[in-house]
Image (tube, helix red, strand yellow):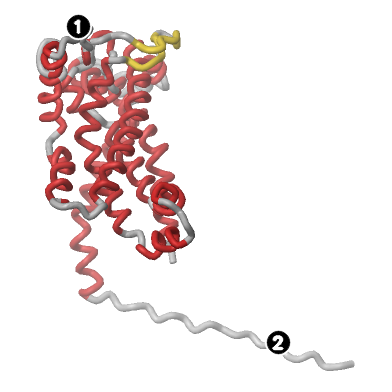
Amino acid sequence: MAMQPAEMTITQPRRARKPWTWERVYPILTLLPSIIAIAVFVYGFIVWTGVVSFTKWNTLVPDLSWNGFANYRAIFQDFRFQSDLRNLLFFTVLFVLVSMIIGLFLAVLVDQKIRLEGLFRSLFIFPMAIAFIVTGVVWQWLLNPSTGVNLILKALGLTHLPKWYVDITIVPSIPWGHIKFGLPLALLAVIIAAVWQMSGFAMALYLSGLRAIPDDLKEAAAVDGANAWTTFWRVILPQLNAVTVTVVIMLIHISMKTFDLIYAMTGPGAAFVTDMPSMDMFQTTFQGNHYAQGAAISIIMLLLLAIFIVPYLTYSLRGEKP
């Protein structure tokens, strides 16, 4: 009987552990205070807010007895919170879409190597440097039905002037729960102000993406007989997919937590036509002293943000892996 060759086992040498030198410890000690502060004042308070949302603490006197999902049921059945969700949906969709379109259009114009490019780029980005509270005050005056833009329209001979942010009309006004589902026309004034401020941000990101596209791709498309329009749709725009995702996520994040613009410009509005969850949370918690319900609204806002942010972060982390 033939002898079988002896099995040989190959053992991998153990990697020598690096000693804990000062060069390794110093970065950890430097970051440790920030890590502790974030753990306590961000994630710790998020956990505490979640705990409070399940309690009966809806008065000035703390009451941490268990209340289950009663606070969540109460706010979802509330007329105001249903209006908030409707307003947030239309505001986010229109704000993000219009800001992207204008930002891309401005980026394409600036990318044409025009004269005074730096001046135009600065003019378009300048509104982003202004605080939302200032933007709200300015646009409140500009779109006031008695002043601002309406004075110009009246001087031009127009008789049916828009009511802007005091208009309570909802289009198409479909019954949904306790509210009418549709676009509140008063919300258009807020969208105009928000787009004016953040379209320059979208332009800056798109401009950096355009400048990163190699000229060889455009030249190859021209050699193949593609005109400028075809080159833009078939060559340039697909190269901006990553930028578009970033713009969408950032603008959604801004729209979800919009507070100061609404607070300065319109407030909740008549019949809550310009109200947002952030405004509802603030007034419910700090003016109405319903701390548990305010915490529940905060958790819902966090979950809405997580729906968009978590997939984006997962995609980004996977893209960074070698």
**Residue 315 appears anywhere in the view:** no
Q: Name the quarter where the C terminus is drawn.
A: bottom left
Amino acid type for the residue under numbered disc 2: Glu
Residue 7 tag number: 2
Q: Position of residue 274 (x, y in %)?
A: 26, 17
- Most foreground residue, 281 or 126: 126
Amino acid type for the residue under numbered disc 1: Thr
Residue extending furthest right?
A: 1
Vertical position of residue 239 compared to residue 84: above or below: below
Question: Is 100 left, or right, of 161 in this rendering?
Answer: right
- Residue 128, located in which quarter of the rendered image? top left
- Residue 94, located in which quarter of the rendered image? top left
Q: Position of residue 140 (x, y in %)?
A: 14, 20
Q: Between marks 1 and 2, how big is the CA–CA gap?
A: 97 Å
Question: Is 322 left, or right, of 113 in this rendering?
Answer: right
Classify mark 2: helix, strand or loop.
Answer: loop
Q: Position of residue 320 (x, y in %)?
A: 40, 60
Q: Label 1 belongs to which residue?
A: 159
Few, some or many residues within 10 Å of mark 2 (<14, 14–19, 20+): few
Residue extending furthest bottom?
A: 2
The structure residue drawn at horizontal position 11% and vertical position 14%, both measured from the top left corner, is 151
The structure residue drawn at horizontal position 42% and vertical position 51%, both measured from the top left corner, is 227
User: Which badge, 1 or 2, is on the more N-terminal residue?
Assistant: 2
**Residue 14 appears anywhere in the view:** yes
Few, some or many residues within 10 Å of mark 1 (<14, 14–19, 20+): few
Q: Are marks 1 and 2 in contact (CB under 8 Å)?
A: no
- Most foreground residue, 219 or 309: 219
Question: Is 253 left, or right, of 6 in this rendering?
Answer: left
Vertical position of residue 61 compared to residue 107: above or below: above
- Residue 209, located in which quarter of the rendered image? bottom left
Image mark count:
2
**Which of labels 1 and 2 is toward the front?**
1
